[in-house]
Image (spheres, coloured by chain):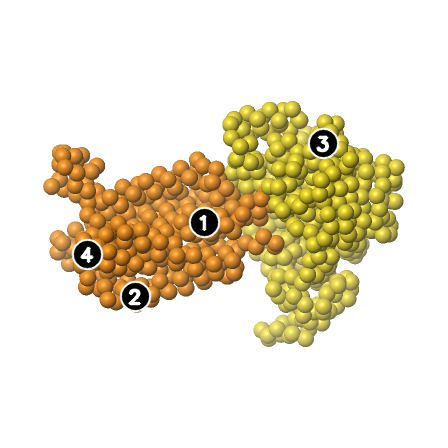
Chain colours: A orange, B yellow
Amino acid sequence: MDTFAQLVILTLAAGTPLVFAALGELVTEKSGVLNLGVEGMMLVGAVVAFMVAATSGSPWLGILAGMGAGAATSLIFGAITLSLLANQVATGLALSLFGIGLSAFVGLDFVSVVIAGITPLSIGGLSDLPVVGQLVFGHNPLVYLSFALFALVQWFLYRSRGGLVLRAVGESPQSAHAIGYPVIAIRYAAVLFGGACAGLAGAYLSVAYTPLWVEGMVAGRGWIALALVVFATWKPWRVLAGAYLFGGVTLAQFQVQALGVAIPSQYLSMLPYLATIVVLAMISRDAVAIRLNAPASLGRPFHPAA
Amino acid sequence: MARLSLSGITKVYPSVVANDGIDLDVEPGEIHAVLGENGAGKSTLMKVIYGVVKPDAGTIRWEGREVAIASPARARKLGIGMVFQHFSLFETLTVAENIALALDAERARGDLPARIRDVSARYGLPLDPDRHVHTMSVGERQRVEIVRCLLQDPRLLIMDEPTSVLTPQAVAKLFETLRRLSGEGRSILYISHKLDEIRALCDRATVLRAGKVTGTCDPRQESSASLARMMIGGDLPHPEHREAHAGEPRLVVDGLTLPADDPFGTALNRIRLTVHAGEIVGIAGVSGNGQKELMAALSGERTVADAGVVRLMGAAAGRLDAEERRALGLAFVPEERLGRGAVPEMSLAENALLTAHRQGLVGHGFVRMDAVREYARATIAQFNVKAGGADAVARSLSGGNLQKFIVGREIRQMPKVMIAAQPTWGVDVGAAAQIRQALVDLRDAGVAVLVVSEELDELFEICDRLAVIAQGRLSDARPTRDTNAEEIGLLMSGSFSAMGSEP
């Protein structure tokens, strides 16, 4: 098989969970809500997706269940912060810890279960074409889904009326309320979307990327997704670039290990996280871009009467 | 038949009755003033009409039919438009996007930019639909709000304190537009506490005091004094103002140039200013023209590389921070009372300690809590602050009382230079008069006082010399008695040639 095509396929595969989770969080944050519970929501999504896939035998049913579980987890966050006006940072952190514990607990019986995951496409004829065959048609179906999600988010935020309203709510909930938009309902929708995306990211990990369940298998990707959104200055295409950078370095790290270089593997495992943060921190130093794209009300509770 | 008729509107908040049985009728084509002090209930009443706030009692009739206005969307559907006092615009969006947000989905479709240009040309309100709001001046932003309302073709337009941020010339243009609108049969509810404007513009006035209607009149038949009596239940207080005896220069700014530290901020351009002992210098200007940046550079929140650019009592102070400048004898009253002037969650005593700790409130590194409380108590007594004692939390005070406390806290430190930014913004008439008197007394005691304000009346009342800030540049300060509102207004719009401030 063509090694270049293989590299691209593996890079995209490694970056895809970040694309899902970070795009979802981006939409949530654009509405002015900071949900730090991505890691937890991803884990809940991963374990539920795996359990449903294992019991039903249908990995796609598992993916759907994972999305639902992620959304349900985010609903807890929404109720506590949007309806009860609790602090978003504290609630989000608690949600992550809750998700880590809950997923480990309910997933106990599934640790050594083997399932048939979602495998990369193999379209007779097309995928066998030289060069482009693998490059264009050889990805996991969920990778194509992540492209679609990117296009959808980009279109929604900057081309649709709904996206305009969402950005307006994130910038000034008071003004949006004054001209008559249901701020709380819009924020709930954004939180649920973010939760479903995080669930999908987790489901991708446990059902498609490495079809198995291991406690804590999200391994900090939720936190990286959060950092991606900030460092990408809330721009979808930069989220995409950051996610694939992470994927690429993850891959390079395995290559180096395979070559038997005498660096402790722990150091190499740190690399993708470190590289992503360093690169994104460097491109995000533009104060104007941050002021123009950052949702001004991020993390602040809103009460209509106040 | 009246276009809008309110009867017995009542709205009760936990601590205050904002509206108490208010009746109000607005005829078609009428410009109707609602007059009252800050806190009289004007804004609450407008929010009731616009569906932002639900009244606890009372009925609203729109063109003869009883209606319940549950939301702003419902109000707009009826034909009610509102221009807010604090603009409800989104800074990072364009003019067209801002306007689209306020329109129904059907109305927002089609060639909106073309319609914006059309309406703005028809009413003399020039606007570029593709500009981002954060690049626009306050006057331009108000145009966006008005055009946004007009695109909804309203039959009643509510204007909430529309002139508080405009130059006198911009006010004249706004009045032209409003008269044209009323000529088309649209009704206008004009909220203000400025008596001259109401007498110049409005056909009828309803006066509110403490949530109740105290009178309805034809303002053209009334004098400012008679309107004021209805509004505050007494005569307008005026501070005593004696001739200034200016002494040595205390605060000197010589060629201060400072880039904006915020993409939405204003860069300061070669600012020169001298404040002598025993005089009050005022800086007029529409907010957002560099006042915030100038205040930060003077208070020491931002330092400048060239120490000699800011001199306090003759000492180069440009590189000193806020604490070091205070040690030299500077006192500072910032624009934001809650958050910068005072810590909202802390008691008045603790807030006093924050700037007055040099007044013997700290000994051997320990806070002397008794002395701190005594200092706060003395401030409360001397400046008639209505508060539940020295341990009351800053947030619990009304705006006027908290401002009196903050000004008092600074004055009792016996400063050599006093800088006050918008000292009476959002403060009721009585407290504002007290604060102005305190500043004048300070001047008479030989202190150099610098006041930054958007209220021209206030500046003309208390200042000995006046300068104008526009687009980050400061005009020369000239004696107040040698200038007038016209000239200051021209300078506020940035036409500095009138005063020849270019070196």
Q: Quadrant of residue A238?
A: top left
Point out which mark residue A115 bears: 4
Mark 1 vs mark 4, CA separation in Å: 33 Å
Left or right, residue A248 beside residue A73? left
Q: Is label 1 in contact with label 3 (beta carbons under 8 Å)?
A: no
For badge 1, the amino acid type reads Ala
Identify the mark at residue B186; answer none if there is no mark. Answer: 3
Q: Secondary structure at mark 2?
A: helix
**Residue B352 position in % (x across, y down):** 66, 65
SS label for mark 1: helix
- Circles 1 and 4: CB atoms closer than 8 Å: no
Q: State the SS at label 4.
A: loop
CA distance for labels 1 and 3: 39 Å
Q: Amino acid at mark 2?
A: Val
In front of the other: A297 or B276: A297
Q: CA distance from mark 4 to mark 3?
A: 71 Å
Image quarter for residue A160?
A: top left
Q: CA distance from mark 2 to mark 1?
A: 27 Å
Check disc 4 and give the amino acid type.
Ile
Marked residue nearer the N-terminal end (1 or 4) = 4
Residue at (72, 45) in percent of width and height: B60
Check chain identity for marks 1 and 4: say if they share one. yes
Tell me the residue that label 2 is attached to: A106
Rendered-image quadrant of the N terminus of chain B: top right
